[in-house]
Image (cartoon, helix red, strand yellow):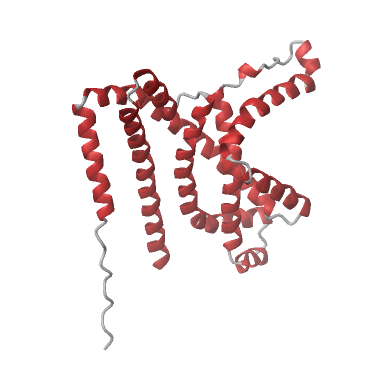
Amino acid sequence: MSSPPQKTRREIPYWLLAIGLLGVLFLWLIASNGDYATIFGAVRQGVFVTLWVTFVAFALATALGLLIALARTSRHRILREIATFYVEIVRGIPMLVLLFYMAFVGAPQLVAFWNWALAMPIEHGLLPGLSVRDFSMTARAIAALTIGYSAFIAEIFRAGIEAVPKGQTEAAAALGLSRMKTFRLVVLPQATRTVLPPLGNDFVSMIKDSALVSALGVQDLTQLGKVYSSSTFLFFETYNVVAFLYLVMTISLSLLVRGLERHMAKSDAR
């Protein structure tokens, strides 16, 4: 007789318990210490700005990254070359440099091109003329994060698409499905299961990289912490609160990503 399968023993995540204990202690410190409570009240609005910038930029980067991935896997060489050129160029530029470039080069050039290309309709009052001030620093930061992360997300999608066995697409073609229907009904659902965990990791990374938008004066968590600490000289206390709030966001999302990976692994094992 075969022995019954042994259940794997789950280890207690002591690291998570330690982080939870530190979180409880820090919350008690914020509630009981006047300086920490004041700092928390001063910078908490930056959490919403950080999440807003991250969510919008990540949604746009995901859509753009999917389009680039489709171009990278296209049969047409010109599309593949253009998409590869975009990915290699963007991935080679540091995010901070890309932020500055979009804020102080990209936006002015876009305004100049708009006013030049549509000069006639603008002169006749059919379209409004633009100025650099029409683009807020928040919009420029979102555009930079979108472009920067779309190149990495494109590679994630490309890997997921190429991981789908060719037999699946060949079977779909044998059934008479068009290329669009094959991608929508066969390739994309299977690729999505593969790309969801790395996409979650990229989302966590974007939350951390969103701190760079403070260099443009965007009133995110980092910027509010910098302004408050420079006016009160409470650098230790202020950046303790800022670091704590970032940890709450990133660790919570990391746990969600791990839970998603375990759920998908269990689904595949069934």
Residue 221 location (% of width, % of height):
41, 29
Image point (58%, 58%), residue name:
159
Give the residue at x 22% y 44%.
21
Q: Is residue 33 above or below residue 18?
A: above
Is 235 or 141 nearer to us in this picture?
Answer: 235
Choose between 1 and 255: the one closer to the eye: 255
**Residue 213 x %, y %:** 51, 30
Check the picture and name the quadrant holding the N terminus.
Answer: bottom left
The number of callouts visible is: 0
Residue 232, image quadrant: top left
Q: Residue furthest top?
A: 124
Of residues 151 and 242, the one drawn nearer to the viewer in this rendering: 242
Q: Position of residue 104 (x, y in %)?
A: 64, 25
Measuring 67% from the left and 16% from the top, which residue is drawn there?
A: 131
Residue that extends furthest to the right in the rendered view of this protein: 120
Using the image as rendered, state which of residue 189 and residue 39 is in the foreground: 39
Q: Quadrant of residue 150?
A: top right
Q: Position of residue 90 (x, y in %)?
A: 64, 43
Q: Is residue 179 left or right of residue 157?
A: right
